[in-house]
């Protein structure tokens, strides 16, 4: 029995696919010290398991996007889920740290393939306000992953070891694979398939990268994501290092603030149901992003920062991202149904590259300044950059979608 495309089960399945990357990253955080203790050559190198995963994730969409345009979404998804499960299982049984790193990169490649396809599938199946509403529901499911993944990883470490974390990830991939095999229909019509001829591939990417709407909204989304990732990267140093919170209190506050993405996504979906134009939704989210980031920076600069004054502003920033994300994804792909897979791939790669750059910037600048000032300053810069990109988009002549 196939999943009905207007059902919650269909939305939950697509949301679970997009949640594979945060599940694979955040769930493993509590196990990093144990990994370093397991392998003699891994001392201080645990974060490499995240770096290699992100490297694979950033590369994969550029490869799998065109493949999905040529062979269909379902075939690439099945291959991606199979590779994800096998790579996670290999991580669980890795005899050396080097093999673990290689397997993590393969897992990242597979997760990247799986994570881009829901956006292409939505573009295949839905239009306009319905598509934006569907994307907001997927984003709401995605927003749950960062809240539960670290807690789940911590629970696993209390009853087992770090290898069980990867075993559970393999089981999750296998479960999604079974569902996809038995219940997911192909969404891309055969007459929309694209050739893998190099000239056609170059033409596909030329179409994507020269589309003003795609370029603008993809960059806007990447800046908004990088701003959120700046908080994720800087929060441990600020809350635990500077403010002296316990790890338990940190996990609680971090989880509560992550609810902002979920709430923002639900608000975006409600506005889409009421036929609020995409640009109005994005404009409102950007105003909230700039205001909350600037307020946090002012608070830190004035020396008035506490966990209880900073975290509500961070929650508002995450809420704003939840509002922005569905509409920017929809608008970026709206003009490109014939190369939706390639476009989604470029968008995800740009998103991860900007997130990685923000994380690296935090790591480089923190030793030279106050961690909270570095974090909020970078968030403010990225929020302003996203707003500038939006203003650049306004004279494009493209009318906002009203239906």
Image: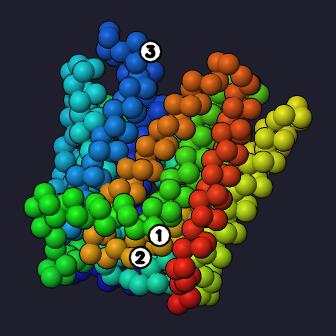
Instruction: Identify the residue under disc 2.
Output: 334
- Residue 369, image x, y percentages: 71, 22
N-terminal label among 2 and 3 = 3
**124 and 197: which is toward the camera:** 197
Numbered badge on residue 247 = none
Q: Where is residue 350 in the image (x, y as percent from the top left)?
A: 42, 50
Residue at image point 89% right, 35% down: 302
**Does the image show residue 270?**
no
* Mark 2 and mark 3: Cα distance apart in space: 45 Å
Above-or-below relation of 273 to 382: below
For label 2, the crowd category at 10 Å Cα-Cα, with few meaning under 14, some 14 to 19 and many 20 or more, is some
Please tell me whether mark 2 or mark 3 is closer to you in this view.
2
| In-front residue for pair 95/160 | 95
For marks 1 and 2, give the CA distance: 9 Å
Secondary element under disc 1, as helix, strand or loop, is helix
Determine whether, in the image, residue 55 is placed left or right of residue 399.
Answer: left
Do tag 1 and tag 2 residues touch (Cβ < 8 Å)?
A: yes
The figure's colour scheme reads rainbow
Which residue sits furthest top? Answer: 40
Quadrant in the picture for the N terminus: bottom left
Q: In this view, does 63 lie above or below 43?
A: below
Residue that badge 1 annotates: 213
What residue is rendered at 46% in x and 84% in y?
128
User: Dot 3 lies on which element?
Assistant: loop
Residue 81 placement, left or right of 16: left
Q: Residue at x 74, y 32 (%)?
A: 373
Of mark 3 and mark 1, the one earlier in the sequence is 3
Residue 125 relative to residue 182: left or right: right
Return the mark for residue 44: 3
């Amino acid at each position: 029995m196939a999943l009905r495309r207007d059902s919650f089960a269909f939305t939950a399945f697509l949301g679970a696919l997009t949640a594979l990357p945060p599940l694979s990253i955040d769930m493993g955080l509590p196990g990093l010290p144990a990994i370093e203790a397991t392998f003699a050559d891994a001392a201080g190198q645990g974060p490499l398991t995240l770096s290699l995963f992100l490297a694979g994730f950033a590369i994969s969409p550029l490869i799998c996007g065109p493949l999905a345009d040529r062979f269909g979404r379902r075939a690439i998804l099945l291959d991606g889920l199979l590779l994800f499960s096998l790579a996670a299982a290999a991580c669980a049984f890795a005899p050396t740290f080097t093999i673990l790193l290689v397997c993590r990169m393969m897992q990242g490649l597979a997760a990247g393939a799986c994570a881009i396809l829901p956006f292409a599938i939505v573009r295949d199946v839905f239009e306009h306000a319905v598509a934006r509403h569907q994307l907001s529901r997927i984003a709401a499911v995605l927003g749950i992953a960062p809240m539960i993944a670290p807690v789940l990883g911590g629970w696993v470490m209390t009853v087992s070891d770090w290898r069980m974390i990867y075993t559970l990830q393999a089981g999750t991939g296998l479960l999604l694979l079974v569902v996809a095999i038995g219940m997911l229909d192909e969404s891309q019509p055969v007459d929309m398939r694209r050739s893998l001829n190099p000239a056609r591939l170059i033409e596909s990417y030329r179409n994507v990268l020269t589309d003003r709407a795609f370029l603008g909204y993809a960059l806007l989304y990447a800046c908004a994501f990088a701003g959120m990732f700046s908080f994720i990267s800087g929060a441990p140093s600020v809350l635990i290092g500077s403010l002296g919170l316990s790890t338990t209190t940190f996990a609680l506050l971090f989880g509560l603030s992550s609810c902002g993405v979920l709430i923002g996504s639900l608000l975006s979906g409600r506005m889409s149901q009421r036929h609020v134009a995409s640009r109005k939704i994005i404009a409102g989210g950007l105003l909230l992003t700039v205001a909350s980031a600037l307020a946090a920076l002012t608070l830190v600069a004035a020396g008035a920062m506490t966990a209880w004054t900073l975290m509500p502003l961070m929650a508002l920033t995450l809420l704003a991202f939840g509002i922005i994300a569905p509409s920017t994804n929809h608008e970026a792909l709206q003009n490109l149904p014939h190369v939706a897979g390639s476009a989604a791939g470029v968008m995800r790669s740009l998103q991860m590259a900007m997130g990685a750059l923000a994380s690296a910037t935090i790591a480089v600048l923190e030793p030279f300044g106050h961690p909270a000032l570095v974090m909020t300053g970078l968030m403010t810069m990225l929020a302003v950059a996203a707003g500038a990109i939006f203003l650049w988009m306004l004279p494009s002549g493209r009318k906002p979608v009203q239906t």
